[in-house]
Image (spheres, rainbow, N blue to C red):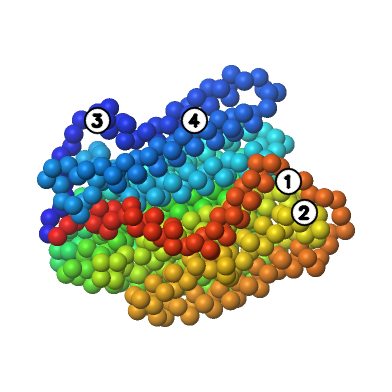
Amino acid sequence: MQVVQQQLQPFTWSDAAYLAPEWILIVVAIALVILDLAMPRRMNRTVIGWLTLGGLLTSLGFVIWRLIDMKGAPLPEGVNAQLGNTIRLFGDSYRIDGFSSLMKIIFLAAAVLIVLISIGTVRSKEIPNKGEFYYLLLPAVVGAMVMVSSSDLITLYVGLELLSITTYILVGMRKYIVQSAEAAFKYVVTGGISSALLLFGISYFYGASGSTNLGQIGMKAAQAGDLTPLMYVGFFFVLAGFGIKIAAAPFHLWAADVYQGAPTPISAFLGVISKAAALAVLFRIVQNVGLLGSYTKPIADDVNLAVLIMAAAAMIAGTTAALRQHNMKRLLALSGVANAGYLLVPVGLGLSGLHTYVGEFIFYLVVYLFMNIGAFAVLSVISKAAGHEELKGFGGLYYRAPWTAVATIVFVLSLAGLPITGGFFGKLFILLGAAQAQNYWIVPIMVVTSVISYYFYFGIIRQMFMRSTGDDQEIAVPGTTGIVIWLSAAAVVALGVMPGAVMDFVYKYFSIAADMLFLYL
């Protein structure tokens, strides 16, 4: 076995071109700060939202172009075909490969939808300076993008802190609302604990391997010998640190309070982009370090079991806690805890022959993106009309906004995992993957928690059809928010009708050797 290494080279303009998606967001963010300062105080800041949207779409276009270009480009002379056209920068501490590009597409698509929601529903009386709200989203997305491209733990930590610090501010943007300040304080405290746990785990990895590069740590895991206990400690502290970011049980207690206090678009950001970034990084670490260590040591089996136990705890804790909720944001937060459990299952399944479960992971993540952001978009409309975020605000929705109610039914059915929606196939693929990997004990937990979740998901439908708020006034849906609702509903149905298209797309651009394992035979 050998580690593919790259000598540290001077940073060139061609290297900068590879980082175009990240540079675009940074430049746009700086430009928007200057524009916001130059604009008259009374001028509407919605234009900054549209410019933010333009920056995100431009960055998304560059990511897609680079992904297609990497697949079609001929391999350089002397490069192993298994390695593909992976681009390595900064001494192999930053990688542009199929997995990171697919995740960046998810982040940017989610951010586009979140900005569209905010343009239609964010009110100035809640957030005094809407300009700050928009341009702070961009460095947060950059942080997520840096995280998924990191092959070095130091680079990973830089991206994590960029994401974390900006989201701390965004959570507390509603400064005239006490709950928002409380949510920001709780998020800062739990985020600090998460960072401390991660740094402690990274220090053990470094102590055992002498490196922070994931490939070299993986090689050392395969030859750990007396240093195996240090590897175990490092793994479990890193797992706990990411468990907080993912809001997986037993590290989920902050989620409901923070989601409730944050602006609705930021709750959607935390539930999709922040969670997805942490899950993707954990996937890469477990696959690379844990599995490579399994050639000579039982590290992988124990790490995979720990991830699956966390997944089971998240499914059980999230589902049972949601049964008692009447606040819609808290319900969606706890639903996110349960869904974090489903997404952790493919992370903990390991390898079956030469098959990794990244297809199941990314498919359910895409479905979760649309059904979760769609649900938050509906909530933003309902809370604006009702003046609160309680479940009773959905009372009589079918009679006040029938088409919005139909879209809500699609999201609810998908969250519950019922046919024919993307959520059904997402859970089914993960369930079949668990059975294929012979982790049969997790299968009934997935099934039972899904069935229990029907109670609170169908409670939303019951409110829409069988309850009334006593107000028959039609609910107005802002145009941009309506686009998000119907685009998300259409995507959820399309993923339920043609699930194979996404799976084929993922495996067309994904390679285990090039994208996950930095150590090659």
In contact (CB < 8 Å): disc 4 and disc 3: no
Which-is-in-front pick, marks 2 and 3?
Answer: 2
> Alpha carbon of mark 2 to alpha carbon of mark 4: how far?
36 Å
- Secondary structure of residue under mark 4: helix
Residue for badge 4: 29
Mark 4 crowdedness (10 Å alpha carbons): few <14, some 14-19, many ≥20: many
In contact (CB < 8 Å): disc 1 and disc 4: no
Amino acid type indicated by mark 3: Phe
Which of marks 3 and 1 precedes in the sequence? Answer: 3
Q: Position of residue 51 (x, y in %)?
A: 55, 30
**Which of the numbered marks, if any, corresponds to residue 477?**
1
Amino acid type indicated by mark 4: Ala
In contact (CB < 8 Å): disc 2 and disc 3: no
Q: Position of residue 265 (x, y in %)?
A: 60, 46
In contact (CB < 8 Å): disc 1 and disc 2: yes
| 453 versus 410 height, above or below | below
Left or right, 15 with respect to 451, comes to left
Mark 2 crowdedness (10 Å alpha carbons): few <14, some 14-19, many ≥20: some
Mark 3 crowdedness (10 Å alpha carbons): few <14, some 14-19, many ≥20: few
> Alpha carbon of mark 4 to alpha carbon of mark 3: how far?
23 Å
* Most foreground residue, 19 or 283: 19
* Most foreground residue, 339 or 502: 502
Which residue is at a point 39% across and 77% down the rendered structure image? 435
Work out which quarter of the rendered image holds the C terminus and state it.
Answer: bottom left
- The part of the image, by quadrant, that contains residue 217 is bottom left
Which-is-in-front pick, marks 2 and 4?
Answer: 2
* Most foreground residue, 396 or 278: 396
> Alpha carbon of mark 2 to alpha carbon of mark 3: how far?
55 Å
Residue for badge 2: 401
Residue for badge 3: 11
